[in-house]
Image (cartoon, helix red, strand yellow):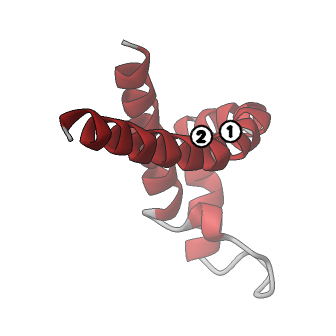
Amino acid sequence: MEQLQRIEEMESAMRRVSAALEKIGPALDAYLEVQSELRALTEYYESPLWREDFEADENGLLPRDLRRGVLSEDGLYDLLRENDELREKLQKVIM
C-alpha cells in the first residue's frame, strides 16, 4: 500500500510540474524577447528625458490622444520593480 501511495504522489507531482513547464516555457521565451525593450525602458526612466516628458505632460504640452502610460508616476516604476522581483525569483530557482 505504501508503494502505491508513493507512486500516486509522484505521478501527481509529475503532472503538476509538467503543466507548470508547459506554461512557463512560452512565457519565459516571451520575456526573453523583450529584454532589449526592458533595457530601453530602464535607461529612459533613469535619464533626464523621462522627467522632461513627464513635466511636458503635466503642463499640457502633449497631444490629448497620445498614449502615455509610460509617464504615469507609478506605472513605469512599478513595471521595473516587478521585473526586479521576477529576476530575484529566477535567481532563487537557479540556486
Q: Nearer the viewer, residue 82 or 66?
A: 82
Q: At x 63% / y 72%, what residue is drawn?
A: 57
Label 1 packing within 10 angstroms: few (<14), some (14-19), many (20+)? few
**Residue lying at the far bottom of the rendered structure:** 64
**Residue lying at the far left of the rendered structure:** 2
Q: Position of residue 27 (x, y in %)?
A: 67, 46
The reply to whether residue 81 is visible in this rendering is yes
Q: Secondary structure at mark 1?
A: helix
Q: Amino acid at mark 2?
A: Leu
The reply to whether residue 80 is visible in this rendering is no
Q: Which residue is mark 2?
A: 21
Q: Nearer the viewer, residue 87 or 41?
A: 87
Whether pointer 1 and pointer 2 mark residues with C-beta atoms closer than 8 Å, the reply is yes
Q: At x 59% / y 36%, what residue is drawn?
A: 42
Quadrant position of residue 58 = bottom right
Q: Position of residue 64 (x, y in %)?
A: 76, 87
Q: Nearer the viewer, residue 53 or 71?
A: 71
Q: Position of residue 54 (x, y in %)?
A: 58, 62
Q: At x 76% / y 31%, what residue is drawn?
A: 36
User: In this rendering, is residue 91 above or below 71?
Assistant: above
Q: Which residue is mark 1?
A: 25
Label 2 packing within 10 angstroms: few (<14), some (14-19), many (20+)? few
Q: Amino acid at mark 1?
A: Gly
On-image quarter of the C terminus? top left
